Image: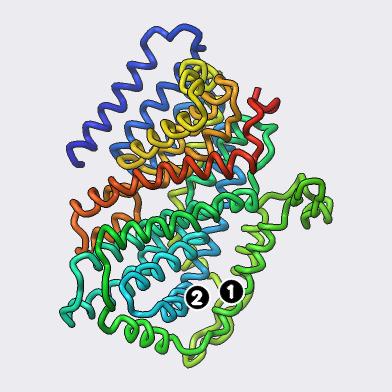
Amino acid sequence: MKRYQLIGLCGGLALFFLVLLMPAPAGMPPSAQRTAAVTCLMAAWWMTEAIPISATGLAPLVLFPLLGILNSEETGANYGEDGVLLLTGGFFIAKSIESNNLHRRIALVILNRGGVDRARVLLSFMAVTAFLSLWMANVTTTLMMLPIALAIVSKDDAAGTDSNGFAPALMLGIAWAATIGGCGTLVGTPTNVILVGVLKNLYPEAPPITFLTWMAFGIPMVLLMIPVTWYYLKRMCRLEGAISGGQSVIADELAELGPMTTPEKRVLVIGILTALAWLFRADIHLDSVVIPGWASLLGVQDQVHDATVAMCAALLLFTLPAGKTKGKDEPPRRLLTMQAAKTIPWDIMFIVGGGYALADAYEATGLVVWLGQELAFVVSLPTILMLFFVILAIVLITEINSNTATANVCLPILGAMAVAGGVHPLLLMIPGTVACSYAWMLPSGTGGNAAVFASGKLTIGQMIRYGFFLNFISIPVMVLVAYLIIVPLFGLSGGTPAWAQ
């Protein structure tokens, strides 16, 4: 165990007992104080990774029943919430895309049209990475794109034509594009799903955030952030001229794949149908016109969730035969096998479930109301300034802390602050969720950052320097999107809604 982990382990326990045994602050119920003690323990362990962060997510299963916060059944139900199942189904779909090599073909086909100009190659890599990251885990997308990028950089190095900034720009572009793309859909990154569950636990009567409504602001943010980040990297790294042999690397790899195989075609069809089922599940409201979703047409709008669609797709993938792969003599198999499914990040479910349990306890014990009243002064600021300071605080926290852990701890507090200050909870919770993912500066910030740093083509100084200045770009962009898109889209300017009071 590393020294900082040992400090985190002991410090977390010390904070737990200190908060548990100290006199309760004015107005805080005893059960809320016990919940705060568990939160301090989990936050310290999450931030220092004193034990695996997924194991920390299991702490509520033990501590909540023992401390009389929630009983075992109430606590355990949070680990099987719709959001957890949606994330699991999303991982199944992503794994089928990966195991049947469809992701690589999509990437190579698009990159093959990108040309050889360094700036255009960077933009092509970022666009492909962001698109794949809409549907796949950010770190998986990064690891898939990394070997192709390294092959191009190596050819350029061998020819002696590489500019000093091309390799780090390409590495950072891939990692950052994966982060940006992950914010575009509900299944793109676990923090988005955490918001859905926290909102449901804190405010059971709140209208659900559907796949389509999330994309209504998520996709515009991706379309804005990718070119902005690309231009920033292009200027900072002074990308000029053409790479040597990069196009041949991509063309050779694409030729090696050969024609599209039967498994790839079948996975592609299921992926498209799943996306359409997500998009058109709920009714679509266009001013006075309502386009009924398929759930309404079937009369099951109150019984199904986006997780239902994800699990239906997973069942199809486990059921349908893959068919023959051209040029290969393989035994019959399914589009998704349990052997492949075993490699999805199951531990994420414990982190998300632990966050849902915390949110449930915050609401049940009244801690969320107490915190909101204590922090309501932030909401008294003008909307633009309020959004700026909230996003800035979350970005600084997530640079040194796990994205999922930051979301688990901060989102209930943001919701409470909003309600206590008389504004809509989503006004702070949605921008805060996106900010949880925007970690640019350190290898520890995201799995994608760690992957590109391990390539050896990027120094820690470059990552910190370029990431630090990117914060001054991304934070105003998030504030702008929140103010101009999220506020009117969700109707957040009318004060606290009845379901949140």
Q: Indicate the secondary structure of the residue bearing disc 2.
A: helix
Residue 169's image quarter? bottom left
- Answer yes or no: is residue 232 visible: yes
Residue drawn where x is 24% and y is 37% of the image: 5
Q: Nearer the viewer, residue 432 or 223?
A: 223
Residue drawn where x is 37% and y is 69% of the image: 145
Comes first in the chain, label 1 or label 2 = 2
For residue 102, the mark is 2
List the single residue furthest toward the bottom.
327
Question: Which residue type does callout 2 highlight?
Answer: Leu
Whether residue 446 is situated above or below residue 412 in the rendered picture: below
Specify the quadrant that holds the C terminus: top right
Q: Nearer the viewer, residue 4 or 437?
A: 437
Q: Are marks 1 and 2 in contact (CB under 8 Å)?
A: yes
For residue 268, the mark is 1
- Answer yes or no: is residue 147 visible: no
